[in-house]
Image (tube, rainbow, N blue to C red):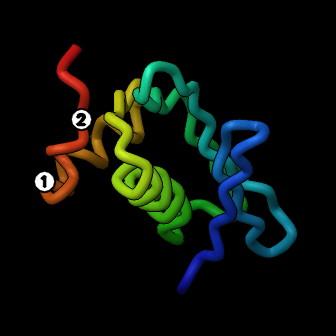
Amino acid sequence: MPVDVVHNAALRRFEAVVDGVSCVLEYELGDGVMTITHTGVPSQVGGRGIAAALVTAAFDTARREGWRVVPACSYAAVWIQRHPEYTDLVSRT
């Protein structure tokens, strides 16, 4: 199922509403580095690939903007291991 993800840059988060339920990925940004701090998908809409869509949108945005990424939240850390096509964006510092 396709998930419509919106980048809310003012709040430094990516958002998706699925079946009326809000899902988010929150990040911090400094010196061209996006640190993904939290990915939250409530259980009532879990298991549909929503978290993956949020993280993919974050990494795609980082690529477009020329940012490096620190996958600090546990979900993003596991996700990057499964998506080697994005490892060039991971900050090693």
Q: Secondary structure at mark 1?
A: helix
List x then y, in percent, for residue 40. Answer: 63, 43
List x then y, in percent, for residue 58. Answer: 48, 51
Nearest to viewer (mark 2 / mark 1): 2
**Crowd tier of the residue under label 2, counting other residues whose Cα lies within 10 Å: few below 14, some 14–19, many 20 or above:** some
Q: Which residue is mark 1?
A: 84
Q: Is residue 37 above or below residue 84?
A: above
The image quadrant where one finds the C terminus is top left
Instruction: Give residue 78's quadrant in the image.
Output: top left
Marks 2 and 1, how far apart in space?
10 Å
Q: Secondary structure at mark 2?
A: loop
Q: How many marks?
A: 2
Q: Residue furthest right?
A: 20
**Does 29 sit left or right of 41 as displayed?**
left
List x then y, in percent, for residue 63. Answer: 34, 53
Instruction: Give residue 45's quadrant in the image.
Output: bottom right
Q: Amino acid at mark 1?
A: Pro
**Does 13 sit left or right of 72 as displayed?**
right
Q: Amino acid at mark 2?
A: Val
Q: Say whether residue 51 is visible.
A: yes
**Does 37 sit left or right of 91 as displayed?**
right
Q: Is residue 55 above or below residue 26?
A: below
Instruction: Give residue 7's quadrant in the image.
Output: bottom right
Q: Which residue is mark 2?
A: 90
**Crowd tier of the residue under label 1, counting other residues whose Cα lies within 10 Å: few below 14, some 14–19, many 20 or above:** few
Q: Residue at x 40, y 24 (%)?
A: 72
Q: Say whether residue 73 is visible.
A: no
List x then y, in percent, for residue 76. Answer: 38, 40
Q: Earlier in the sequence, mark 2 or mark 1?
A: 1
Q: Residue at x 62, y 36 (%)?
A: 26
Q: Residue at x 38, y 39 (%)?
A: 67
Asked if the residue at tag 1 contacts the one at tag 2, i.e. Cβ–Cβ closer than 8 Å, the answer is no
